[in-house]
Image (cartoon, grey):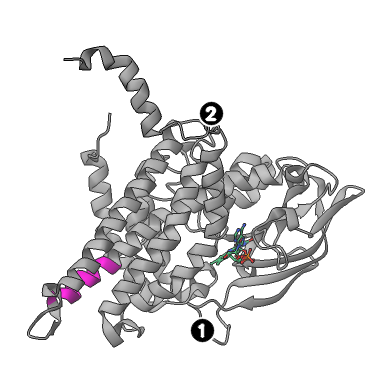
Amino acid sequence: MIDFRVEPDFQEKLDWMNTFVREECELVDLLFPSPYDMYDVKHSKARRIVRPLQEQVKAQELWACHLGPDLGGPGYGQVKLALMNEILGRSSWAPTVFGTQAPDTGNAEILAMFGTEEQKAKYLKPLMDGDIVSCFSMTEPQAGADPLEFECKAWREGDEWVIEGEKWFSSNARFAEFIIVMAVTSPDNAPHERMSMFLVDGNTPGIEILRNSPMLTDDLDGENATSAYIRYNQVRVPLDAILGGEGQAFKVAQARLGGGRIHHCMRTVGLLQRAIDMMLERAVSRRTKGKRLADHQIVQAQIADSIIELEQFRLLVLKTAWIIDNEPHGAARTHIGMCKVQLGKIFHDVAQRAVHLHGALGITHETPLGKIWAGAPALAVADGPTEVHQVQVARAFLKNVQPAPGLFPTDHNPTRLEAAKRKYGHLLED
Ligand SMILES: Cc1cc2nc3c(=O)[nH]c(=O)nc-3n(C[C@H](O)[C@H](O)[C@H](O)COP(=O)(O)OP(=O)(O)OC[C@H]3O[C@@H](n4cnc5c(N)ncnc54)[C@H](O)[C@@H]3O)c2cc1C
């Protein structure tokens, strides 16, 4: 059964969110546009505004909706989360106001699944209450997205693990109360059992932030940047800091990245809808050559392409969310990969058209479009570049396919026509 309707009770919640995000969160975006502010829980001015907003979200039972009731969230499931995240995607601050910002969502999932009771009390509870932020430290400067190239290592010494090595682009490390670090513990094991995941308190001696690299959306001087190049100088953690067991980092990372990737896709639907809404308004507001932009067929084609592509992407994301909700854990992996591949393309194409349709205004920071456009390349790389996911999707479909039995394809017209004649030939005679 396929049903695209939304239950009236839940639609009411979505309507509330829609108004709240436009009237409150988008104002916070304007007041505090730097990504620095969002993750700095000690930023008193921003928190003075955001805390009461978070309380309103909690009162609506819309706080931390990615988690189930056992962990303090309402546990709506991924399909409903997709509809909610579409709304949150319009605003940079909205995920923080609703307790669903990355990478904290994924890190909360890891702690909930693999943390000890003591670790959960110390880190998970304040993380879910929005009192602290966290960091996920996996990518390495020489290795990029390929964990098999990782060199950051950890070894046991008495009742401690010692972590040594470098990590690249560890978002928000400068504000993080804890960091989840992936390190090689058994270099001689099979490729996917070489690494372990560690929970490291942010104040542990030996964590050195070499620099924070400004992204295209940041100020050039890098003062507000939050993407950390980190060196772990023999960082010592207790034995129970290992999450999910020795050699299990890959499994733990997959549990986390799957959720993170699809949530980025859900939010991007909302962000691109905002860009399309702006295109529509611009098209009916601006005149050239004696008519509105909306009356030029080439502009109509750009608008139609953007709307159709977004609708296709949205349906793919919703189907993926449905698979996560209804099929066994891991069944959505290929679909998550498809979403990730399509995310990079649609983000680039729609953002580019929206900026272009606004002319010079589009390339200023006088509309949200400039920031949206500058963010497009980041999501095609974060959580693994497009190509890695293309390979994964293609392999998943190729793996059980058999070669053609003879010289020609199975679906070869002359061969099949012969078979059809053998079956029905007697009926074709006059
Ligand atoms: C906004 C943002 C936030 C991030 N946050 C975090 C974080 O919090 N923690 C963390 O650990 N990491 C984080 N990252 C890092 C991210 O995981 C890496 O950037 C990503 O995995 C790619 O690694 P790389 O940048 O070294 O690119 P590379 O791996 O060097 O890839 C560069 C290019 O090479 C090509 N390429 C790479 N692999 C293949 C392949 N298999 N087949 C064909 N072509 C390929 C692609 O064109 C790709 O874009 C973040 C990145 C961004 C952009």
User: Which is nearer the eye, 144 or 247?
Assistant: 144
Q: Residue at x 20, y 15 (%)?
A: 429
- Give the amino acid at mark 1: Asp
* 280 drawn magenta: yes
Label 1: state its secondary structure. loop
| Residue 306 in sight | yes
**Image coords of residue 127 (percent x, y):** 56, 54
Spot occupied by residue 399 in the image (x, y as percentages of width and height)? 57, 36
Crowding around mark 2 (Cα neighbors within 10 Å: few <14, some 14 to 19, many 20+) is few
Is label 1's Cβ within 8 Å of ligand 1?
no
Whole-percent x, y for residue 243 in the image:
71, 44
**51 sits to left or right of 151:** left
Ligand 1 located in image quadrant: bottom right
Q: Quadrant of residue 5?
A: top left
Which image quarter is the C terminus in? top left
Determine which of the numbered discs, if any, sits on residue 219 in the image: 1
Assess disc 1: are there few (<14), some (14-19) or many (≥20) residues with their C-alpha within 10 Å of its C-alpha. few
Of the pair 46 and 100, the residue shown nearer to us: 100
Examine the residues drawn in magenta and state their main secondary structure: helix
Residue 287 or residue 239, whichever sits in front: 287
Which residue is tagged 2?
405
Earlier sequence position, callout 2 versus callout 1: 1
Provide residue 52's location: percent of width, then percent of height. 38, 63
Q: Is residue 282 left or right of residue 145?
A: left
Seen in the picture, residue 361 relative to 9 is either above or below; the reply is: below
Could you give the CA–CA distance between mark 2 and mark 1, rounded to whole angstroms? 60 Å
Residue in the image at 18% along x and 68% along y: 300
- Could you tell me if the residues under marks 2 and 1 are in contact, i.e. CB atoms within 8 Å? no
Q: Which residues are magenta?
A: 275-284
